[in-house]
Each structure stands twice: as C-alpha cells, then as structure tokens.
Amino acid sequence: MTDFPSGERQRRTSTARRQAGRLPYKVGRITLADMAHPPRIPVWLPLNREVVYFITFCVRERRPVLANSAAFQSMQSAIAKLQNWWVLAAVVMPDHIHLLAAPKERDLDVGNLAGALKRWIRQDLQADWKWQAGCFDSRMFRSPVAHQRIGD
C-alpha cells in the first residue's frame, strides 16, 4: 500500500467513488449553503400524471406587510402575468403567500415562478420591504392531494 500524506488517501478514494457514480452528492465538509439548496429531485411521475406544487414564500423578517387589499390585488395581477404556470389556488397571509401551482411543462423551475411573482408584487406595491431568499415547496403527487390542501 502506498503512503499518502494525511487525508490524501481519503480524498482520492472519495473522488474515485464520486467519479464512478456511487456518491452523487458532495463528499466532505458540508456547509449551511449546501444544506439550504439541496439538489432538486426530477419529476418521476408517469407522463399522464399532473404535477402540482404547494409553494410558500415569506417576507423578510416576517413583517406583516401583506395584510391589505393592495397586496391581494398585486398578487392577482402577478398571477395574471404568468404564461407557463396555472395557479390553482393562492392565499395571501400577513407575512407570507401560499400557492398551489402546476407547470404547463413538467420540468419548469419552481424558483423561477416564485422569483417572478415576488418581483412583480414588490414592483406593483413599490415596496420598501424585501422577500426572504428562495421559497419552500413540496410536490403533490396526484391531484386529490392538491384538492385536500385547498379544502375540496
């Protein structure tokens, strides 16, 4: 066995495994930034199954700036601008927004949807506050689950 400097053997072994496809994720020291942006799991549902996402995005520092009719109207206006998504339901809360949305093409990025809506709402309101970075989302696996979320 060849002698390697301290830690060199482990690094080479980890690199070889990653390259062989056995370890798809980063090996070694994991930072908070790595945990905040886990890799997106692709849509594995059959092609005939609808993809629906439950999405939440929040105002920075959870300031209650959305508890007014102007914010609701801005949300409606922003939804009307969407071209690649269907919004099935939306709820504007004082400090965050919930959406049930379905992409018109399966592999569209949820982050792009949230980013566009957040940008359009802030512009329309001429807001002095900011959104939290990113959004929280979960994929609904079939339409009945989505209908349960909206109270059907």
Image (spheres, grey):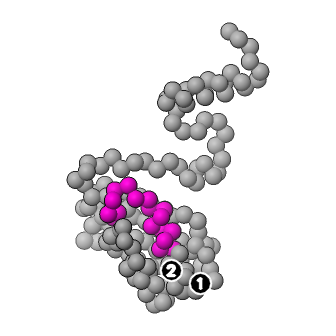
Q: Which residue is mark 1?
A: 127
Across and down, in percent, residue 96 comes to 50, 74
Q: Which residue is mark 2?
A: 121
Furthest residue to the right? 5
Q: Quadrant of the N terminus?
A: top right
Magenta region, residue range: 101-118
Q: CA distance from mark 1 to mark 2?
A: 8 Å
Q: Is residue 21 left or right of residue 145?
A: right
Q: Quadrant of the C terminus?
A: bottom left
Above or below for 44 versus 143: above
Q: Identify residue type, mark 1.
A: Ala
- Name the foreground residue: 135 vs 95: 135
Above or below for 2 versus 31: above
Q: Residues within 10 Å of mark 2 (few under 14, many from 20)?
A: many
Q: Residue at left 43%, top 71%?
A: 98
Specify whether residue 110 is painted magenta. Answer: yes
Q: Are marks 1 and 2 in contact (CB under 8 Å)?
A: yes
Above or below for 73 versus 100: below
Q: Residues within 10 Å of mark 1 (few under 14, many from 20)?
A: few
Above or below for 43 versus 112: above
Tell me the SS state at disc 2. Answer: helix
Q: Identify residue type, mark 2.
A: Ile
- Name the foreground residue: 99 vs 24: 24
Furthest residue to the front? 83
Which is nearer the N-term, disc 1 or disc 2?
Answer: 2
